[in-house]
Image: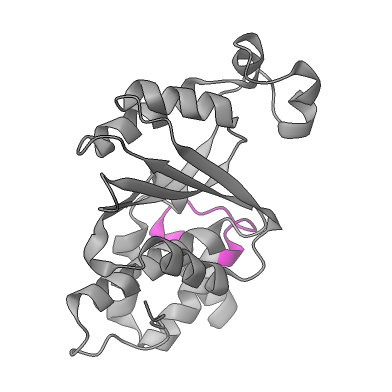
Amino acid sequence: MSYISISARSPVWLTPAEKRSKRLYQRIMSGLKWHQGDTLKFLTLTSKVEGGLGQAWHTLYERIKRMTPARLVREGYLDASKLHYYYPNKAISEPLKMEYLKVETREGNGVLHAVFFGDYLPYAWLSHVWSLVHDGSWNVHVSSTRGGIRSPRRVSSYILRQYIQNQNAHVRTSWNQKWVFRGFVQKWKSLLKDRPFEDALNAWDVMMERHMERPVDDWDRLEELVRSYYG
């Protein structure tokens, strides 16, 4: 799949697949910029059976949110001596965090590709839980970048190439609320209505990259943030 830049408006002659690719690029890029400086992780979940991936993912995600480092140790998935290494700034009784964007494809019986920011997930625990929630499907792969994201654009393009090589295999994309913030797609679209595309994109980049300096609670404060940098 060829990379399609979002630095210009989508020409009317783009195919539906190309437009979908551009939308996905924007969703990925927004999350990477929002979490810039954090370590990005990659997760692939395969299926032994057709169907049921969406419900299986929901169940897995709920179990991740209920799991704690202390429980991982008690259940034998993590050595107590590794707690500080894998969770250096986390209370061992605090539930694991995962802010994700996922793509479902028709590869094989169906595959889920997810990128996420959050806590370490032991492979053995992840594989075991996936097999429980999705009919014995145990094959999972999880990895991470080294340190924070230095080039969100390059990583976004890489994710598209790796996950959506065949546009016809793409089923759906979804994310949780903290991948960026709740309603961010609607906010992006409203920004496009009021500005030329390049101005909207520059303003959006400011919102994504500077939000930690002034926490964003609502759209008015986002607009205020843009004006403070662009006038």
Task: Give the residues drawn in magenta, as a range.
Answer: 209-222
For the point 60% across and 36% down, the residue is: 119
Classify residue 52 by image quadrant: top left
Q: In which quarter of the image is residue 164?
A: bottom left
In reply to whether residue 89 is colored magenta, the answer given is no
Q: Which residue is drawn at 37% across and 49% down?
A: 182
Q: Can residue 62 be seen in this view?
A: no
Judged left or right of residue 42, residue 193 is left
- Left or right for 66, reference 55: right
Rendered image coloring scheme? one colour
Q: Is residue 218 magenta?
A: yes
Quarter containing the N terminus: bottom left
Q: Position of residue 187 (x, y in %)?
A: 34, 64
Q: Where is residue 5 in the image (x, y as percent from the top left)?
A: 41, 83
Query: Would you place residue 8 above or below residue 221 in this image?
Result: below
For the residue pair 18 and 76, the one nearer the viewer reads as 76
